[in-house]
Image (spheres, rainbow, N blue to C red):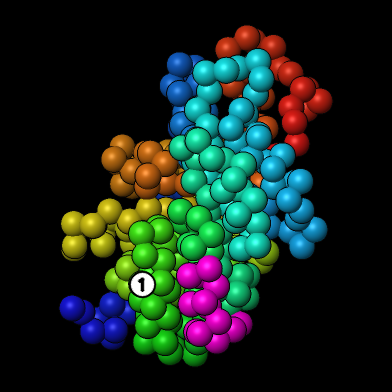
């Protein structure tokens, strides 16, 4: 096992190089047939999310309905990968999604700040898993990370991973608070070595949330970790991804950095509250040539 100091050694990141590579990949154009395929793939990778203080069982049930049947007139569409909700909504989502392959993901560990004790975080994690969560989205302790207390962050992830049992663990770095690309890389390495099944950019509550350069840095960390250990870790950009065009750009980044093995909901997700409708609109447009207005789509 590597020492924490080895896991967190600084990997220098060429900021301009990262941004140039993103810009270069964004300029790629995609053929019409591949575009429909990419739009459907993106749909299947969504963690359809509602994380508002105003959430109600009714809203969660409505969202689950949308997850099960994204568009009434397009019956052969893939469903989204998961519904992502606050802990007290897990039983509601679990019941509403019974009989489907759609997972229930729950944020835990005092989302979004993470400002609680380890005991409370573990209790919350065990509770959501007991209530049926298939996936747990935890936040790292950014204050401890920025102080350089990497062992604290590592141990916390290891403990939460253990509390997850069979549920998959996504580790949210909250990159908008990490200040530098080097820190994003370091937090990615720490999370993967501590057992993360996925690394995730953001809670959606802090700006900037997901960005493509940050995602590229994390994808490169996943690639290097895979070369080192042979273990495939998933990636989840989250927050602010609302347009089909953005989603396709993210998929190009994944394909070019990690290859097609990562182009599946098993290894790539979008954390998004309102990307679904734009993907549906674009799919309808590609298939019929007609652009349906937002009124034809139920709320995400
Ligand atoms: O994890 C997902 C985010 O909370 C969703 O953020 P969004 O509302 O900007 O799509």
Note whether 254 is above or below 163 in the view shown: above
Element at label 1: helix
Label 1 sits on residue = 162
What x and y, as percent, mark residue 176? 59, 68
Rendered-image quadrant of the C terminus: top right
Q: 77 left or right of 235?
A: right
Please tell me which residue lies in front, 232 or 286. Answer: 232
What residue is rendered at 71% in x and 17% in y? 291
Question: Quadrant location of residue 170?
Answer: bottom left
Please tell me which residue lies in front, 292 or 110. Answer: 110
What x and y, as percent, mark residue 56? 76, 53
Q: 181 left or right of 272?
A: left
What x and y, as percent, mark residue 153? 43, 81
Rendered-image quadrant of the N terminus: bottom left
Note whether 98 is above or below 187 in the view shown: above
Whether residue 18 is visible here, answered yes or no, is: no
Whether residue 64 is visible here, answered yes or no, is: yes
Q: 202 left or right of 296?
A: left
The range drawn in magenta is 115-127
What residue is rendered at 80% in x and 58% in y? 54
Residue 124: in magenta span: yes
What residue is rendered at 19% in x and 62% in y? 229
Please tell me which residue lies in front, 106 or 28. Answer: 106
What residue is rendered at 60% in x and 17% in y? 74
């Amino acid at each position: 096992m590597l020492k924490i100091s080895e896991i967190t050694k600084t990997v220098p990141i060429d900021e301009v190089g990262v941004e140039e590579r993103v810009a270069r990949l964004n300029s790629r154009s995609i053929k019409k047939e591949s575009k429909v395929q990419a739009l459907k793939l993106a749909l299947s990778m969504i963690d359809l999310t509602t994380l508002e203080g105003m959430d109600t069982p009714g809203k969660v049930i409505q969202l689950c309905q949308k997850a099960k049947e994204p568009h009434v007139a397009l019956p052969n569409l893939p469903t989204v990968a998961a519904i992502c909700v606050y802990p007290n909504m897990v039983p509601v989502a679990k019941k509403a999604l019974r009989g489907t392959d759609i997972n229930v993901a729950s944020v835990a560990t005092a989302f979004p700040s993470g400002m609680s004790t380890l005991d409370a975080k573990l209790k919350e994690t065990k509770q959501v898993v007991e209530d049926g969560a298939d996936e747990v989205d935890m936040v790292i302790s950014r204050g401890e990370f920025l102080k350089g207390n990497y062992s604290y962050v590592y141990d916390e992830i290891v403990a939460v991973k253990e509390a997850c049992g069979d549920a998959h663990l996504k580790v949210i770095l909250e990159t908008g608070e990490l200040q530098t690309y080097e820190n994003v890389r370091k937090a990615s390495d720490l999370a993967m070595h501590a057992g993360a099944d996925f690394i995730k950019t953001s809670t959606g509550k802090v700006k900037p949330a997901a960005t493509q350069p940050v995602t590229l840095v994390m994808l490169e960390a996943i690639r290097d970790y895979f070369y080192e250990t042979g273990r495939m870790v998933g990636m989840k950009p989250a927050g602010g991804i609302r347009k089909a065009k953005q989603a396709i750009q993210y998929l190009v980044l994944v394909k070019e950095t990690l290859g097609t093995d990562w182009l599946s909901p098993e290894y790539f997700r979008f954390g998004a509250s309102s990307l679904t409708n734009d993907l549906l609109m674009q799919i309808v447009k590609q298939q019929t040539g007609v652009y349906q207005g937002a009124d034809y789509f139920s709320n995400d």
